[in-house]
Amino acid sequence: MLSSQLSITTDVMPTIGFDRLAAHLPYEWIEQALSAHGVASVRRRRLPAEQVVWLVIALALFRRQSMEEVLSTLDLALPDTRIEAVCKSAITQARARLGQAPLQWLFEQTAQAWCAQEKVANQWKGLSLWAVDGTTFRVPDSPENREFFGAQRYASGKVASYPQVRAVSLTALPTHLVSAIEFGQYGQNEMLYAKALIGRIEDHSLTVFDKGFVSAEILLGLSAAGTERHYLIPAKSNTQYEVLSGTPEDCRVRLRISPQARVKVPDLPEAWEARAIRVESANGQSRVLLTSLFDRRRIKAQDLADCYRRRWEIETSYRELKQSMLGEALTLRSRLPEGVNQEIWGALIAYNLIRLEIAKAATEARVAPTDLSFLRALHIIQHELIWAAGMSPGKLPSHLARLRLQLQMAIVEKRRGRKCPRVVKARPARYAVRHLKEP
C-alpha cells in the first residue's frame, strides 16, 4: 500500500520533513476531508489546514511533548524567512479553525480502507473477526468539558475529579485496527453507543461482545441486518434459557425476552434461539457462551472458546492507546469539547497508523500482527519520524524498507502460563492507632 502511494504523495506534498507519515495517507483524502467541510486554507499561512491535520495526528504520537515542540521537531510549519518560530496562540487558533469534522471524516475513510486491506489475510473460518467493547477517556477539568461530557458520580454522592468521555469501539481482532467508534457524554449508556455501531459491521463476520452487551435488540439486530453476521457473547450468571437439543456442553437454547424490553422495542419477538456452549477458563471457572453459529460440524465448541479468549486482547489495545501511546497522561490536552473530539479522532488515526505498519511488518515476518510489540513499534516509528524530518523524497523507499525490517525485530516472547488462579487482592490490615486522652 505504501509503496504504490509513495510516488503520488511525494509529487504533490511539499518537502516539509513529514513525508514518512504522508506516505500512509493519500493527499487526496486530506483534500476531500477539508473541502467536504469547508475548512481549506484560502490565504497562505505558515500552518495551513493540511499541515494542521498532520499536527493533530503527531500530537498523539509525541504525547510527552508540547505542541510547539512537536511542530518544531517534525518541521511541520511552512518556511518563512521573517519568522523563525510559530507562537502557541497561532497553533491553538489553527486547530480551532480546523475543527473536528475533517479528522472524523479522515478516520472513517482510513479505517475502512486499512481494515479492508488486512481482512482477507486474517479471516477465521471464512469470517472476519471483530470485537465491540467500551472504554473512557479523562479530559481536562474545565467548565466547558464538565458541562458537555459530565463525570462519574459515586454512591456517596461525590463527583469524580475529572470529566470523562465514554466510548464504544469496533475493533478488528487479528490486527487491532479500530474500524469504527462512537463516543460522547459519560452519562449515556454503553448500549446506546453499541447500537450505533451495529449497522457498520460487515457481512460474513463474527463479532465478539463482552457480557455487558447482552441484549436481544443488539444481538438480533446484528444477525438480521445483513448476511452471515454472527455474534459470540458470554451469558450472564442469571441468564435463563430452555434447552431445545444437544448436550449440556453444546446445545441449542431458547431465551425469552422480557416484557419491558418488548415495550421499548415492539418489533422484538417473544423469544429467540442461540447456541450455548459451556467452557472452562484458565482458573477452572465455568462459563456459558452464546452464539448464532449453529453449525457444529464446521465450527466446534473449542473453536468458539479459543476465539472468545482473543477478546481480552482488545483490553490490551485500549491500554496501548491510552497508556503506551498517550504516555500515561492523566488527561487529554484540550480544554474545550470541540478540541477533545478533534484530539480523539487524531489519536485514533495515529493508533491505526502504527497498527497498520505492525500488520505489514508481521506479514513479511510471517507472524501474527499481535505477536509484535506495540510499544517497541511506537518507539521505532517515533525515532524514524524525527530522523526522516529532513529526508529527501527519493530516499523514502529505502527508508520504508529499513523501518519494516526494524519492526520485524519487535516480536514479543511468549510468556509462561499463569500458575495461580486470579484472586481478589486482600485489603492490608491497618496499624493500631492509640488515641491520647485529654488531661
Image (cartoon, rainbow, N blue to C red):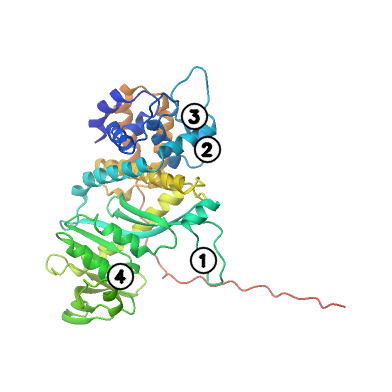
Residue that numbered label 3 is attached to: 72
Q: CA distance from mark 4 to mark 2?
A: 42 Å
Residue that numbered label 2 is attached to: 66
Query: What is the residue that sits farthest to the right in this orientation?
Result: 439
Label 1 packing within 10 angstroms: few (<14), some (14-19), many (20+): few
Between residue 417 and residue 224, name the one nearer to us.
224
Which quadrant of the rendered structure holds the N terminus? top left
Is residue 134 at least partly visible in the picture? yes
Q: CA distance from mark 4 to mark 3?
A: 49 Å
Amino acid at circle 3 = Ser
As drawn, the label of residue 250 is none
Residue that numbered label 4 is attached to: 214
Q: Position of residue 152 (x, y in %)?
A: 50, 63
Counting residues from the start of the chain, the first of labels 2 and 3 encountered is: 2
User: Helix, strand, or loop for circle 4?
Assistant: loop
Above or below, 109 against 199 in this view is above
Amino acid at circle 4 = Val
